[in-house]
Image (tube, grey):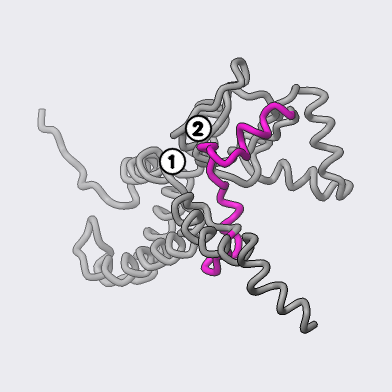
Amino acid sequence: MALIMTPLTLTAPLAQAATFVGGVVSHLAIFRHGEWHLATNKIILTFVASQAAAIMLLPHVETPIGTDGSHSAAADISLTLGAIWTMGVFASMLIYRGFFHRLGRFPGPFFARLSNWYVTSLRVKKLHLYEEVQQLHSKYGDIVRLGTWGSSKSCFRASEWRLLTNISVPGPSELSINNSEMFAAISAANSPCTKSDWYDLMQPMVSMQNIRNIPEHSARRRIWDRGFNAKGRYGHLYPVLLVY
């Protein structure tokens, strides 16, 4: 009995399944690590460029992989596989955020784990987000996972109030902390906590207070300190005040 092998085409279910798996792998191996908020434009442009390249090249490839000169068929294949790859990325991202994220140990609304849309809905509900957050603290305790801005390099173990450093937690990763004991640990000069990605809001313009790199911030601040210490105030600011 002869086994007849059908040639694999890009429209076959197997090719589409492989593309979906490729999206999942892309998230787990690449997008799950580090920060990507400043690379959004590059990611979109790369995706669009890859789609355009596929539409241009596939008509010049023989079937079954190619389309034998049909740009419309190439566009259909490219857009379909691109959409399936995107679905794989987002499916993996939502499952990871909902069930496997490192901040999953902290209590909070389930949908806040998945997207920023949850806290956005609270913000526009009555335009009193602080009241909504206070209600969440009344329900869940001193630490609530909100899942808004932020991809901090540090997080807290609620059971011990100890700071855990060198933990990257991309995705919805903001904790609202309603406990005065944590203020010194977070804001002290020797704190290992770093500023969240919210401080990149004004990129590419970066003021001193928005610098997230601690050594770079320290170097910039030393320059400013010269003008605001006792000698600097008397030598520079005092004459200016006398004039004006």
Q: Earlier in the sequence, mark 2 or mark 1?
A: 1
What residue is pinned by disc 2?
Answer: 96
User: How far apart are labels 2 and 1 at the CA level?
Assistant: 9 Å
Magenta residues span 180-208
Does residue 157 show up? Answer: yes
Name the residue at 33% across, 42% down.
18
Expressed as whole percent of the image width and height from the top left, the position of residue 20 reads 40, 42
Kindly identify the residue that appears in the image at 21 percent across and 65 percent down. Answer: 61
Reply yes or no: does residue 203 show up in magenta. yes
Which mark, by number, is residue 97?
none
Element type at mark 2: helix
Q: Quadrant of the N terminus?
A: top left
- Please state, as top left, top right, bottom left or bottom right, where the C terminus lies in the image: bottom right
Mark count? 2
Query: Measured from the top left, where is residue 102 in percent x and y?
Result: 51, 28
Q: Secondary structure at mark 1?
A: loop
Q: Which label sits on residue 32? A: 1
Instruction: Give how far across and how far down residue 191 sits, in percent.
Output: 54, 37
On screen, residue 164 versus residue 232, left or right, reads left
Tag 2 and tag 1, C-beta contact below 8 Å? yes
